[in-house]
Image (cartoon, rainbow, N blue to C red):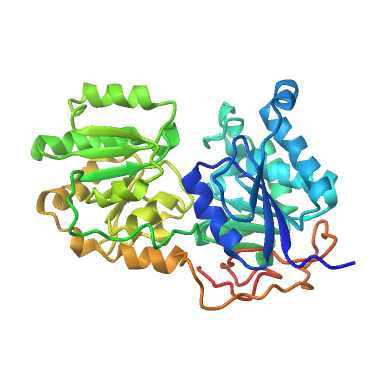
Amino acid sequence: MTERRGLRLLVTVTFNPNQLRAHLEPILDLPEVESVTLVADVPAPDLPKLTTVVPSPRLVRVLGRAVAKTVTCVRVARREQPDWAISYNLVPHGLNARAASRWGNGCRTMYHQIGGPVEWLEGGWRSDNGILGRLPRRSRVVERLLLRSVRRNTVCVAMGAKGRQGLVDHGVEDARAVVVPPSIDDARFVPAPDAPKPYDVVSVGSLIPTKQMHVVIEAVARLRERLPGLRAAIVGEGPLEAELRALAAERGVADAVDFLGFRPDVEAVYRDARAFVLASRYEGLSIALLEAMASGLPAFVSDVGELRDAVRDGENGWAFPSGDADRLVELLEPCCASRPAARLGSGAADARALASRPRSRPATPRCSRGAEPRRPPRPGPRGRSPPGRAGGSGRAPGAPSGSRSSA
């Protein structure tokens, strides 16, 4: 029998196309990866090596969307015998990956904590998760149950050093907790200092409570009192769009704030702007932030989560207390009034150093096929290595030798 050459991966997540490319293209680019099967609600963009499996409408009608995806993950694991099941976000995707391992084929599992510790902290009641976010109050019982599932993963991945430390502090073995920042395509996101800038401010994110877009609109309204020509763009879609449009009208800036919806060409919007704002209540390490910085924009971000991994006050941007529109206005006004964006222009180099994804690589990483992490919860049948780059305390056990630390 001829041995299969490459790794087969099962991935479970719900992403928009931009997020999907940022997280999956680096994995698909690895020569040791043979194929990736994505279990998702809708088909993914056409990418080499990637196949999407969408739960059947009948299964969704009978079991509901979340359980239908769990069943689909188990079926795919049994049929395709993946080496790894990789999940982004804990509920339901992390649980689905664990189900694929336990009831599917015993493959290893990788949980990627892209939303930060809020995914499980206090039961996830402050998160934007459609299930956990409905909890009326914090729950230590739910937190313990979620962390029990987290600890059973072969590898736990955080977006930055702070998230990784949170995992270790809550019982994840140090050697199993690694840092893998999101990637950016450095051919798409490049500075355009000479391009016209119709927008002074741009903010990119889902229109949901945790993104706090109302803080951006409030800051724009106050700045317009001093800078009448100021304009802003909000890129994203979500359930709060009507409410945010009404707020802009109430504050008298409906004609100054453009709601652009989801933009697959978000790089064009960054070229049209002079500053980037992220006002989230919590974050991991934002893909939008890194893309904006790579495009040469100074970044003004809430001082939450792992955003400080990228933003340094006075060098490539500023951090402000979450929800503090007064401080955001104070920081933004000099940028919008005197156009000093070039003085905070190191963001492009910083973003590339942290997360750039060149389209060709000078060296091909080797896959360590026999390496075994310590005390694997359910060892896979072939003992193969996790894809991607590792950071934190060092390289993930069995990770490709070309991995680089980002902590």
Query: Of 313 and 208, which appears nearest the observer?
Result: 208
Q: Going by the picture, which residue comes out furthest to the right?
A: 1
How many numbered badges does the structure rendering display? 0
Residue 137 is left or right of residue 334, and the answer is right
Residue nearest the viewer, comparing 76 with 250: 76
Q: Is residue 196 above or below residue 96?
A: below
**Where is residue 35, by image quadrant?**
bottom right
Using residue 221 as the reference point, say whether residue 31 is left or right of it: right
The residue under the point 69% across, 37% down is 141
Relative placement, left or right, of 239 versus 58 is left
Residue 172 seen? no
Quadrant assignment, res 398: bottom right
The quarter of the rendered structure image containing the N terminus is: bottom right
Which image quadrant is residue 120 in? Answer: top right
Query: Is 5 above or below relative to 292?
Result: below
Relative image position of residue 74 (x, y in whole percent)? 79, 42
The residue positioned 66% from the left and 65% from the top of the image is 174
Residue drawn where x is 35% and y is 23% of the image: 243
Say which of 235 and 51 sits in front. Answer: 51
Point out residue 272 in the picture as x, y percentages from the top left corner: 24, 48
Residue 285 coordinates in the image, percent (x, y): 46, 54
Asked if residue 24 can be seen in this view, the reply is yes
The structure residue drawn at horizontal position 77% and vertical position 44%, both measured from the top left corner, is: 76
- Residue 376 at x, y percent in the picture: 79, 61
